[in-house]
Every structure is written in structure tokens, then in C-alpha cells.
Amino acid sequence: MRKKGFADLFFVFLLLYLFLPILATMLYAFATNWNKTVLPEGLTFKWIATLFQDSSFIEAFGRSVLLSGGAVLLALLFIVPAIFVIVLYFPKYEKWIQAAVVMVYAFPGVILAVGLIRAYAHIGVPMILAVLGVYVISILPYIYQGTRNSLRSVNGKQLLDAAELLGASKAQAFTKVLLPAVYPGLFAGALLSFSVLFGEFVLINLVVGSRFETVQIYLMKKLSTSGHIASSVVFVYLVLMGILTFIISMLTKRSKGAAKA
């Protein structure tokens, strides 16, 4: 009983340690003043309203969505078909994809940014396109794992063979049988990739900076001018990530349910 009580106490302390700073930041986004008391002296929606009336924030948010969504879309168009082919028909080559996945984690953002600047800055390639290409490669682990798990959970190769035995062409078997069976896993991987890219700061700041201001760069600027606005940006970001996490959870449950069925 004593061990169980200690474990519960430690768990509560861990939750407070993890969530108290987040809760304080969210409260500060709605605080009128918070200087002399433990809790805010008043609550207001002024800072949230001010944030969404700022055209710079709206533009930065749009750029983040465009850059992150564009990278995810390119990955779905070019990387996912390659993963399908390798996992279904050439599984012996999966080791090369797994090696590429490991290599993605081998390059810190600062070193990668310096390499991009030295490689592309003097040959006329827009640096934002170089960053977009790096983003596509950087989400390879999430796209690969989500695609692979989805295919394995529904026995993708057997599903395709069964559809072809029943008279479907390869294209019909792929588009009408396999894709509907695995799309929850693919969509969950895409949303996870989007959430990771949306919060990326080091690479875009070092390579492009204020020339292509994203939400994270906007947040960095506001940290030195207005703590309330910066907290509002964090609050909006947390709400967005919470929504994405909920959708990913639902899709994962649906994918597991389809696999059991």
C-alpha cells in the first residue's frame, strides 16, 4: 500500500511538473494583469482578439499551413506510392528505407541549415524550396511507419491478390480495395507529419528567417514585445495540436477496428 501511495504521489507530481507551465501560459493568454497574485487578477479575450486582428499573424499562420501542408502533400504523392510498391512487392528492399529513416535523425537542424545554405545559396535555387524539400524528407519516418503499419494490419498483399482473383484490375484493386482499407493510417501519419512540421523552428529560421515568416518566427518576435500576445500564439498552437491529436486518435482506433474486422 505504501508503494502504491508513493507511486500515485509521484504520478501527480509528474503531471503538475508537465502541465503546470502549459496551464500558466494558457492563463496568461487570457489575463488582464498577473503581477501580484497567484492567479490572474482578471480574465479577458482582448489578447486573442488582438492576435487574430493582426494581419502579420494571419499571414504567418497561412505560410506555416502552406509550407507544412505542401510538404505532406508531396510526401503523399511521391513517397507513399514508393513505400506501397516496396512493402507489397519488394520487401527485401525495406532495409534501405529503414536506413534512410535512421539517417533522417542523424542530421541536427543547425548542421543541416548550414549545409543547405552552402549548397543552394549561390546557384539560384530559392531557399524556401530547399527547405520544402528537406521537410518532405524529414517526415519520412512518420509517413513510412504509418503506411507500413496500415498495410501490415490489413494484409495488403493478400487483399490485392484477392481483389485481382475476383476480376479487378491492378488499378481497381489499388484504388477501390486497398486505399479505402488503409486510408485511416495514412491520414493519421499525414496529420502527425503536419503537426511536427508546423512546429519546426530551427531550420526555417536559420535558412529563410523573416523573409518567410511562419508562426514560430512570429512567436519568437512577440516574446520580446508582448508576453500576452506570445502566450496567445502558444494557446492557439496548443488548441490546433490538440485537435490534430484527437483526430489522429480517432483514425488510429478506426484503423485498428478495421484490421480486427
Image: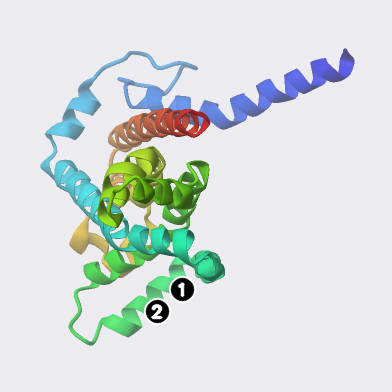
Residue 209's tag is: none
Label 1: how many Cα within 10 Å (few below 14, some 14–19, many 20+): few
How far apart marks 1 and 2 lie (CA) works out to 6 Å
Element carrying mark 2: helix
Residue 96 position (above or below residue 163): below
- Amino acid residing under circle 2: Gly
In the rendered view, does 244 fall on the left or right side of 61? Answer: right
Q: Residue at x 53, y 64 (%)?
A: 91
Percent of width and height locating residue 224 = 32, 46
Label ID, residue 115: 2
Q: In which quarter of the image is residue 71?
A: bottom left
Residue at the image position 37 percent from the left and 30 percent from the top? 247
Q: Which of 176 and 194 is in front in this view?
A: 176
Q: What residue type is labelled 1?
A: Ile
Asked if marks 1 and 2 touch (Cβ < 8 Å), the reply is: yes
Q: Which mark is residue 111?
A: 1
Give the position of the N terminus as an image quadrant: top right
How many numbered discs, if any? 2
Q: In this view, does 191 lie to the left or right of 57?
A: right
User: Nearest the camera: 26 or 34?
Assistant: 26
State whether residue 73 is above or below residue 153.
below
**Circle 1 — which element?**
helix
Residue 65 x %, y %: 23, 47
Residue placed furthest toward the right: 2
